[in-house]
Amino acid sequence: MPYFDAASAAPLHPVARQALLASLDEGWADPARLYREGRRARLLLDAAREAAAEAVGCRPDELVFTPSGTRALHDGIAGALSGRRRVGRHLVVSAVEHSAVLQSAAALEAAGGTFTEVAVDRTGRVAPGGYAAALRPDTALAALQSANHEVGTAQPVAEVAEECRAAGVPLLVDAAQSLGWGPVEGGWSLLAASAHKWGGPSGVGLLAVRKGVRYAAQGPADERESGRAPGFPDLPAVVAAAASLRAVRQEAAAEAARLRELVELIRARVPRLVPEVEVVGDPVRRLPHLVTFSCLYVDGETLLHALDRAGFSVSSGSSCTSSTLRPSHVLRAMGVLSEGNVRVSLPRGTTREDVTGFLDVLPGVVASVREQLGAPSGPAPSEAAAQAGAELVVDSLGKRCPIPVIELAKVIGEVPVGGLVTVLSDDEAARLDIPAWCAMREQEYVGERPAETGVAYTVRRRV
Amino acid sequence: MPYFDAASAAPLHPVARQALLASLDEGWADPARLYREGRRARLLLDAAREAAAEAVGCRPDELVFTPSGTRALHDGIAGALSGRRRVGRHLVVSAVEHSAVLQSAAALEAAGGTFTEVAVDRTGRVAPGGYAAALRPDTALAALQSANHEVGTAQPVAEVAEECRAAGVPLLVDAAQSLGWGPVEGGWSLLAASAHKWGGPSGVGLLAVRKGVRYAAQGPADERESGRAPGFPDLPAVVAAAASLRAVRQEAAAEAARLRELVELIRARVPRLVPEVEVVGDPVRRLPHLVTFSCLYVDGETLLHALDRAGFSVSSGSSCTSSTLRPSHVLRAMGVLSEGNVRVSLPRGTTREDVTGFLDVLPGVVASVREQLGAPSGPAPSEAAAQAGAELVVDSLGKRCPIPVIELAKVIGEVPVGGLVTVLSDDEAARLDIPAWCAMREQEYVGERPAETGVAYTVRRRV
């Protein structure tokens, strides 16, 4: 049964499993103790730190193990901000960072600091100069992912690091999605990562802080991990994380090339197999194993369930799948369609048959979800009921994504070319998906205005 | 090779190992996802939470899994303090809490709050009414361990909980050392524990927060674990923790009775086998598996190394073993001897032969360490050189524990009964160990005063 959500959590790599089992017997004692069990644990911990530091490209004493990638980001950002508190309390992040970074920014703001989000283009990439423009004299820290977790776009880390270096601001890189594929290039100051993204166990994050970077760990003092990660270390998991990082790196070049081909296959075939689809993310500068596309007139949750029944595990940034009813902040920042969003991230070892099997079932699954929702069947609007000068109002209040877009698509043919359709919606996704639909369908998005209830989105028919 | 440091970390229980292995295959995916791997992970997580909650004696929705016991304490204390910030910023703790609690108190103070340490008696137990007297109108939280991690003394949790309830103050119980032996009695409000103390894996702590307790999680927002423990859960470890907690509880009554007998054997025999020993901690109201004693004229680090060479792994609260050069805060709060301190904590399954083997080697090991250090060989001071009215000054500046006490013991016989000996020392442990030596040797401890360098400790010879 193909599992295509490696970007959430990769299945345990065989080397990780083997190292975990071996160190259950050798690595349960306290590495801070002087007796033989403690000394054995200390040897394992030291060796794991050396192996992980080599893969990261830092000194062992610059690297600590945290309980997760999220904690590495939370603690790393808080420690770096505090270390430069005299400079100021301003943080620069991209608009498409992992929620752990954006929530750290929100926590900073709640505590009286400020942050700036650097915008991305339609591929999800920050513009050259974007960080340079956002840096201020009171900027304590900048943070940028090495590659985006939802659409796979690689970020220009080395260039941004250079912009930060010129301004004297440390750059923290969230390397969670890319570290298994290779070290992060460029002059970063801090780096965070997460073992279960590369096939290591859960429960292990990495936090590297370059010598010379001002850093003040927050929270109660604790002697573990150079005072940067409190609590008894989960040594078997740490050992498994380091061993598997080394193992996946050895296979990385060959596996990346293989998976990149499979991803190319999906990128090329999906738009031909499924009508009204937008493939998102940078087509070239990207993670090798991840591809994301969105399907018009499709409810993300229904689509995931249907694919799950067909045997494929994928994830989605559609608002329709989330309890918050908000579309992914990444898709929103990119300004691309969020409805019917599917992220396919291939674990190592995925076969061509797994992918072609997915491509075989996808068109039927999308068509059946569209049929259930009463989506328009043809790609072009009917002109049957067109009336010159007409303006049409569609009341979609109380209806959730993708219904507002489906209703818009159904009635656009009822106004003449040049006529207006206004959709009333109180669904947060409409703000993203109605303009995205217009771009995909070559209609003109006129704009939005507050309505008595919800928001009125107006579209001018062009074709 | 007997390992006697279960209070640091217990070897993995067979049930934990089994559950961990089983859930490596079933529990690696994200339990928040909708596909089958996610649903399986969610089932495992829910079942683990139910089992752990049952063992704790709370509702499943009151319990979250944290990455360690330390994090459970750090986060639980911070969350409870913040939840009652309007009441005030005062925290009450006992003087013998785990460092994670005391460091949380220090962090509160650094942030502008205050805390009160409730004293303990010579057994390490807080007095009835001690918490009631410390509670104030601005007390946001009180914290008390269920049993002490260094000397095993059980605390009167139910009585203190009642004192707190009467004052309307929530009580957080650190149950790290006792949860494997049984639930914590009494009306606690929050509870923290650590799986690797009961034979579960590293990487799992428990934090229970009773419904109705005001609580505001600190740090960046995160949806995991009811917003109380950020980061991807280490599900295999969580499953193993819950399964092993259930397993050790089933064996607890029988195993406690068995280990209590072995501990009684050590408590009774050590003072007979080794001269100049103080067994510390409450002799009755105590953990079943833990016993602590201190040996005069012995350097803790040398003793641990010698015991390690003889095949026994124990720990020590002596300053001589620690990089901080400070004796254990627990022994200090109790006012008992810290030099030559040995904590024996028996893991489940320890045999009578393991313990008698330890008792066989201990006298010789202690004697050889004392001989290396030139400790006085007889228990009573020689009166050979006694001079009426003499006052003797011993300069032990720059010498570390146990040398100052050894030098004191060597010269006490040189003054007549009623005469004074003053020891000059800059070793932090002397403050604790010289009065403790006086109590053990029935000499009179006159007091301390600042000297030009270090501190002058004065003793009057009584016997």
Image (spheres, coloured by chain):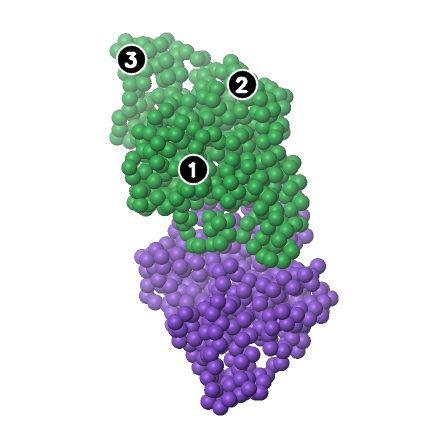
Chain colours: A purple, B green
Residue B400's place in the image compared with B227, above or below, is: above
Q: Residue at x 53, y 84 (%)?
A: A414
Look at the image and tell me in which quarter the N terminus of chain A lies: bottom right
Type of amino acid under label 1: Ser
First in residue order: circle 2 vs circle 3: 2
Chain letter for mark 2: B
Q: Secondary structure at mark 3?
A: loop
Label 2 SS:
helix
User: Where on the picture, by quarter, is residue B107?
Assistant: top left
Q: Are marks 1 and 3 on the same chain?
A: yes
Q: CA distance from mark 1 to mark 2?
A: 33 Å
First along the sequence among labels 1 and 2: 1
> Quick one: which residue is furthest to the bottom in this view?
A388
Query: Label 1, label 3: how many angstroms apart (C-alpha)?
Result: 55 Å
Q: Which residue is mark 3?
A: B419
Residue indicated by mark 2: B264
B373, above or below A260, in the image: above
Asked if badge 2 and badge 3 are on a common chain, one would say yes
Is residue B104 in sight in this rendering?
yes
Marked residue nearer the N-terminal end (1 or 3): 1
